[in-house]
Amino acid sequence: MSFEALPDGWRVWNEEPGGRTILVFRPDVFDGDELPAECLPTIYLTNGSRRRRPGAGQYATDEWHVVLFLEPEVEAVAETYDDRADAVDAAVAVAKRFASGGVDYRGAYQVPREAYFDALDGLVGDR
């Protein structure tokens, strides 16, 4: 699978050949007016270290990680794969799951953001 199979609303924001890729959901509405820019749903595909130390992500590992962030510190999905091809397939699958309403973004938050959730509900799932 390739990123050409991304569902509507998802875009490749950055792709390093054979390396890290960043996918974003509906950057046209996460502009600070309609929805907060810091809440832009973002999928990172990387083989960088997942340690929380500054700069740790610059060190390559033998594993590929697919992480859906709802905000910089709010992860909704985090999966690990043995190779990049499987991770690409998984990133596309996560994007499809999110776009169809199959990701519980409410459950990822410790402090509810009801107005934001209501707005996001209008962008995902059966519209």
Image (cartoon, helix red, strand yellow):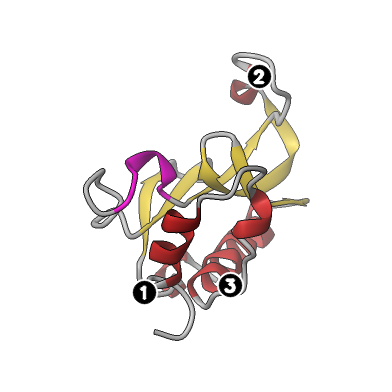
In the image, residue 54 lies at what x, y percent? 61, 13
In the image, residue 122 lies at what x, y percent? 38, 73
Q: Residue at x 54, y 66 (%)?
A: 92
Give the mark nearest the N terminus, 2 or 1.
1
- Mark 1 crowd level (few <14, some 14–19, many ≥20, 10 Å Cα): few
Question: CA gap, disc 1 to disc 3?
Answer: 12 Å
Give the mark nearest the N terminus, 3 or 2.
2
Highlighted magenta segment, given as a residue range: 35-40
Question: CA gap, disc 3 to disc 2?
Answer: 29 Å
Secondary structure found at label 3: helix
Secondary structure found at label 2: helix
Q: Vertically, is 98 above or below 76?
A: below
Give the mark nearest the N terminus, 1 or 3.
1
Q: At label 2, which amino acid type do we have?
A: Ala
Q: Vertically, is 125 above or below 70?
A: below
Q: Classify residue 53 by image quadrant.
A: top right
Q: At label 3, which amino acid type do we have?
A: Arg
Q: Does residue 106 appear to the left or right of 25 in the view shown?
A: right
Q: Does residue 73 appear to the left or right of 82 in the view shown?
A: left
**Magenta highlight on residue 37:** yes
- Label drawn at residue 56: 2
Q: Residue at x 53, y 73 (%)?
A: 96
Q: Residue at x 68, y 61 (%)?
A: 86
Q: Nearer the viewer, residue 42 or 88?
A: 42
Secondary structure found at label 1: loop
Nearest-to-viewer mark from 2 and 1: 1
- Label drawn at residue 97: 3
- Reading the image, the residue beneath label 1 is 8
Q: Does residue 50 appear to the left or right of 35 in the view shown?
A: right
Pointers 1 and 3 in contact (C-beta within 8 Å): no
In the image, residue 56 lies at what x, y percent? 66, 19
